[in-house]
Image (cartoon, coloured by chain):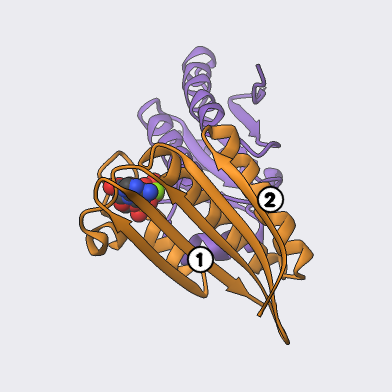
Chain colours: A purple, B orange
Amino acid sequence: MEKIPILKMGRFLLVTIQVDMHDQLAMQLQENLTDRIVAVRARGVLIDISSLEVVDSFIGRMISNIAAMARVLDAETVVVGIQPAVAITLVELGLSLEGVRTALDVDRGMAMLQQQLAGQR
Amino acid sequence: MAVVHRSVLPIRSQEDIVRVRQATRESAVAQGFSLVDQTKIVTAASELARNTLDYGGGGEVEITRLSDPPRRGVRLVFTDKGPGIADVGQALADGFTSGRGLGLGLGGARRLSNEFSIESRVGEGTQVTIARWR
Ligand SMILES: Nc1ncnc2c1ncn2[C@@H]1O[C@H](COP(=O)(O)OP(=O)(O)OP(=O)(O)O)[C@@H](O)[C@H]1O
Ligand SMILES: [Mg+2]
């Protein structure tokens, strides 16, 4: 079975979505990620979607769900690398990734999470 | 208006939805669509293919590349023999879902296309047609 790898980077988790996911795979990622957040007590999740050429309402909902679940588990989610064409399309689709923060790339997303953590102490 | 290329794909599984996205992309690229226009029609195709599978119980899509000089377009016709839609106006409204969706698929697909039409009969099925031109 294909699986989307989840990398641990300090107190954060990095997920790089590199395939055109079918729905089941997206659901699985949601579950695996929640498990991992708990297992490693992650404080932040970075979802890199720079390779995704399409984000439809299903993937959008998955991202929102991940962010909501992560928040309950005391972790912040940042989505990084949304392609401009995808961002434009999302607006027209009517999908607002509510409660999801975005950054241009992994480095900036990471900085965002670190700042947030530092601010909480 | 001339048909340049036509293909029909089944929509019976989640993998088929991925294939519909890929085939739609191929057609949009072949027709010289910009990246944004490609993304729009592929996203619309993804929404409609999922509806065909989830609500229509499966069906098929016909993908047609059209030439209408100086315009070039891609038309997608999604057909299922599912339960149909009793109130199309309601189904089109953003936020309406009979499942667990966001209710964005139909309205979104309409906004992402240049042409949109829907024909549905309760107990017989649903056909949604979209087209995008460059
Ligand atoms: N092919 C179809 N056959 C029967 N009913 C349909 C079909 N397509 C859509 N519908 C009905 O129209 C409603 C709205 O569809 P729409 O795609 O806008 O939203 P959704 O699928 O419920 O959620 P989302 O697409 O945001 O995940 C659906 O909930 C369903 O009741
Ligand atoms: Mg839908």
Q: Nearer the viewer, residue A28 or B23?
A: B23
Is residue A112 in view from this perspective?
A: no
Q: Is residue A9 left or right of residue A22?
A: right
Residue in view at x 47 percent, y 36 percent: A76
- Residue B58's mark? none
Q: Find residue A48 and report its image quarter.
A: top right
Q: Nearer the viewer, residue A13 or A85?
A: A85
Q: Residue A55: horizontal and vertical position, in percent?
A: 56, 50
Please, is residue B1 above or below residue B119 in the view?
below
* Chain assignment, label 1: B
Q: What separation in Å lies between label 1 and label 2 (alpha carbons)?
A: 15 Å
Q: Crowding at label 1, few (<14), some or many (≥20) Cα neighbours within 10 Å?
A: many
Q: Mark 2 sits on what residue?
A: B23
Q: Find residue A110 and report its image quarter.
A: top right
Q: Residue B109: horizontal and vertical position, in percent?
A: 46, 61
Residue extending farthest to the bottom is B70
* Chain assignment, label 2: B
Q: Quadrant of the N terminus of chain A?
A: top right
Residue extending farthest to the top is A39
Q: Crowding at label 2, few (<14), some or many (≥20) Cα neighbours within 10 Å?
A: some
Q: Mark 1 sits on what residue?
A: B130
**Kind of residue at disc 2:** Ala
